[in-house]
Image (cartoon, grey):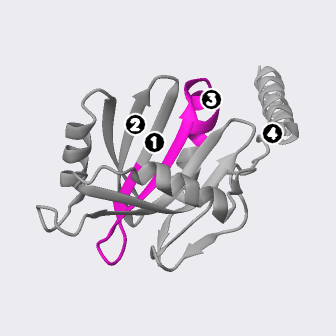
Amino acid sequence: MKNIYLYISLLLITALVISCDEKNDIKIESPEFESTLNDNIVIDEDLSISYQIPLNWNEMPASLSDKFVARLSGKDKNNLIVYSPKSFYYDENTSSLLRVGKVSLKDNSVPKVLTIDTYVELFKKYNANLIVERNETQYSQLNVIELKIEKGNLISFKIVFYNGAKEIIQLDFSITKENTFNLKSTIDASIKSIKLL
């Protein structure tokens, strides 16, 4: 009888050892991490931020940027809010655009102090024909308001936050609807890269 118990015990120990050896042979394969952002960090002292742009996006030449500024500002003297983009990035493959700049009031505007909430309210008021979704997220040191705006085949993600000087900074990503699924994680990675100087 003792021999049977000894035999069973040896079988269990052998099975356990074999099981442990098999587990040691198992290789856990993790997917290779591929960065979706450009390695270069953009440091903008005027905006008091640093950030990374998506991989394969290029800065637009100053001459093209000037044309964009003119078209964005328009000639409507009744606009209360001015968005002054100073950097422009473009992805030729997806026809996507990123603008980075400050949001401020015109000189004689009322109210005299602009908050992000006031900016969002006024934006919705003057763009009542657009579908605007608001989300609030916190990335380490930043409280970020994200406005998702749909207009025809275009989707704009306006990323709005305060820099250290309490100025309103906006990163504005414009992409086509068909590229939203492929680019949203890249845009999120770019947002997470923003740091205050």
Q: Secondary structure at mark 2?
A: strand
Farthest residue, direction left: 111
Q: Which residue is mark 2?
A: 148
Q: CA distance from mark 3 to mark 4?
A: 29 Å
In the rendering, at what x and y percent does residue 11 appear? 83, 26
Left/right placement of residue 162 relative to residue 15 reads left
53 lies above or below 27: below
Earlier sequence position, callout 1 versus callout 2: 2
Which of 98/86 is in front? 86
> Pointer 1: what residue?
157
Q: Is residue 93 left or right of residue 82?
A: right
- Residue 175 in picture, x, y percent from top left: 57, 36
Q: Does the magenta portion include 148?
A: no
**Tag 1's secondary structure?**
strand
Secondary structure beneath label 4 = loop
What amino acid type is highlighted by mark number 2? Answer: Lys
Q: Hey, what amino acid is under mark 3?
A: Asn
Q: Of the residues under marks 3 and 4, which one precedes in the sequence?
A: 4
Residue 52 x %, y %: 62, 61
Q: Nearer the viewer, residue 57 or 23?
A: 57
Return the residue at label 4: 29
